Image (cartoon, rainbow, N blue to C red):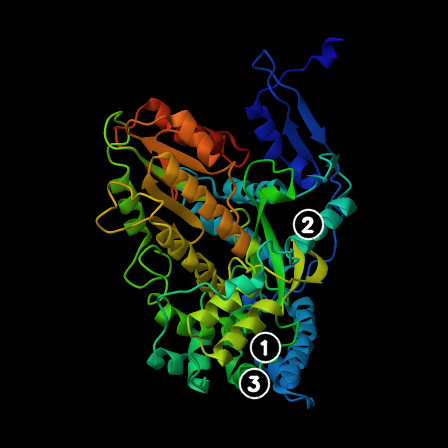
Amino acid sequence: MDEFNLCIQKIDVMEVAHSEWMHSMPGCNVSFKSFVESDHCAMDVSLYSNVHKKPRPFKYHNFWSTHESFMDLVRSAWDVSVEGNNMWILQTKLKSIKNKLKKLNREAFSNISSRVIEMKNEWKTTQVAILTDRDANTKLFHTSMKINHRKNLITKIEDEQGKLDEDYEHVKLNAVKFYKDLFSEKVNLVDKRAWSEMTVSCKIDHEDYNMLQRTITREKIEACFMSMKGDKAPRPDGLSLEFYKDAWNVVGDSVVDAVQSFFQIGDMPKAMNSTSLILIPKVQQSKTMRNFKSIACYNVLYKGISTVIACRLKTILHKVVGIQQFTYVPGRHISDDILLIQEVINGYHKSNGRPRCFIKVDIMKAYDSVDWFFLWLMLEKLNFPAIFISWIRKCVSIVWFSINLNGSLNGYFKSSRALRQGDLLSSYLFITPFIPKSYILAGRKDLTSYHPNCRDIKLTNVCFTDDLCILSAANDRSLKTVKETLQYFGQITWLKPNLKKSFVYLAGNVDEACLSNTLEILNTSLPIKYLCIPLNTKELNARDCRPLVDKIKQKANSCGASN
């Protein structure tokens, strides 16, 4: 039986991973079981993946524009006569050009994708001084890419009953169902008529009102497309920003006409506003859909429209959001938010002093839970023009989603709430629902005491996107008011606090257990991490640095590291 007692080190597994075996067995997967009363663990090797390959969606490659016949192909597609409105004409011609580009790729760039990968790998070797063997490094990086791709594969997921399902067809259905339900409108617990009674003190003035509804010029649209950056995210239609820039002399007028027609008649085909969701795990070995973060990838044409609107919105946003918000406000930076919180928690390690607290609130599925009705109402109360609101409504509400799972698109469904994370316009709009939160807290100042360090400036909370921090005196009455405010805010906006991921930091002469129970939020101690930056009032010790050391060890032991 000795032949069944083989023990190997993880370093040996790395050698296997970097060998020809990985290339000949692309479906293999290796996982390690938990350690039990020993430094040995079982290794589970699966030779075949349950992920069935599907044809990948069309994707524009930038190198196509270097071919001598590229512009002729674009012109031939654009010279075809098409009847309909400007949006329909543009969509039809774009569909035609994709077929021609596929043919160009087959005839002129056969196997170019694999050659590009090899050249990229060779170029990367020059950036790493410690790796000198050029041939070996090319193979190393190519293997590393395969490992990273395999790590990102979603092959199994827990269903609603907590049962692990490894049937890939079920995994796809569960992913589509989860986001279809998540983006569906829920019955609000607050009578929507009561929202009309809510007041805001900051509104845009007459000059800004006229600026927002000013006609969008052709020059502005072209400048917007030329200034846009980013060519990494896969678009649902496969056409990247570089395609439009490469072929702008031919397609530019049609693009500008289509964008202008949107601002004139407010119509947008659903194909133009189609969105694919990329799932990024929040934790290692995510087993439920709730442990994935969705990033929206949308077509370049929609990005051009939303960027034009966002640029106008950006110029007036700082006039209505208040001093509590640090996101996307000119003159305010993330470092200001961090330094402010660092100043507030100064002295929190001392047991004496006035009772005070710092509450870090985690918003549950923040972007995915925004109520559209409340968003439109807030824009109206801020005195935004009706036509500007209608542009935003078209961009936000006429959206069709697909789930990008392991490189293939699954499902095609419409949403009735939520904003798209990754969309610049959505990032600006996401700030809007947080505006009434400050007014709600300020309206209950008779029941809430200010944090001792914030009394002079009358500051009750700070925000950076969905990172919400509440600053208050640590007494029973104040914390009850904070709790009621968070509950009410969650009811009217559907931006509900996730109490399991929220924390309260108490300082001074306080009954920590009692006050923590009042809030129903876990009480913790310094150091803390806020906006990815560690905050503390004392020098860091070895225990504080352990997470960083563990992360370095994890990188060193990963299969992508060289041995």
- Camera-nearest residue between 538 and 345: 345
Q: Residue at x 49, y 52 (%)?
A: 489
Q: Quadrant of the N terminus?
A: top right
Residue 424 screen position, x and y as percent: 47, 64
The local secondary structure at tag 2 comes to: helix
Residue at 64% in and 77% down? 94
* Residue placed under numbered mark 1 in the picture: 70
Report crowding for label 1: few under 14, some 14 to 19, many 20 or more residues within 10 A (C-alpha): some
CA neighbours of label 2 inside 10 A, class few (<14), some (14 to 19), many (20+): some
State which mark lies toward you, 2 or 1.
2
Residue 189 image position (x, y, % from top left): 60, 53
Residue 451 location, quadrant: top left
Amino acid type for the residue under numbered disc 1: Phe
Please tell me whether mark 2 or mark 3 is closer to you in this view: 2
Q: CA distance from mark 2 to mark 1?
A: 42 Å
At 41% across and 79% down in the image, what residue appears? 212
Q: Examine the image and state in which quarter residue 234 appears.
A: bottom right
> Vertical placement of 164 versus 81: above or below?
above
The answer to whether residue 36 is above or below residue 155 is: above
Residue at the far front in the pictured view: 446
Outermost residue, top side: 1
> In the shown orientation, is residue 349 left or right of residue 259?
left
Q: Which mark is residue 49?
A: none
Q: Earlier in the sequence, mark 3 or mark 1?
A: 1
Amino acid type of the residue that numbered disc 2 sits on in the rendered structure: Phe
- Callout 3, which amino acid? Ser
Residue identified by numbered label 3: 261
Question: Can you identify the residue that label 2 sits on?
Answer: 178
Closer to the camera in the image, 105 or 337: 337
Q: Name the quadrant containing residue 59.
A: bottom right
Residue 198 visible: yes
**Does the image show residue 116?**
no
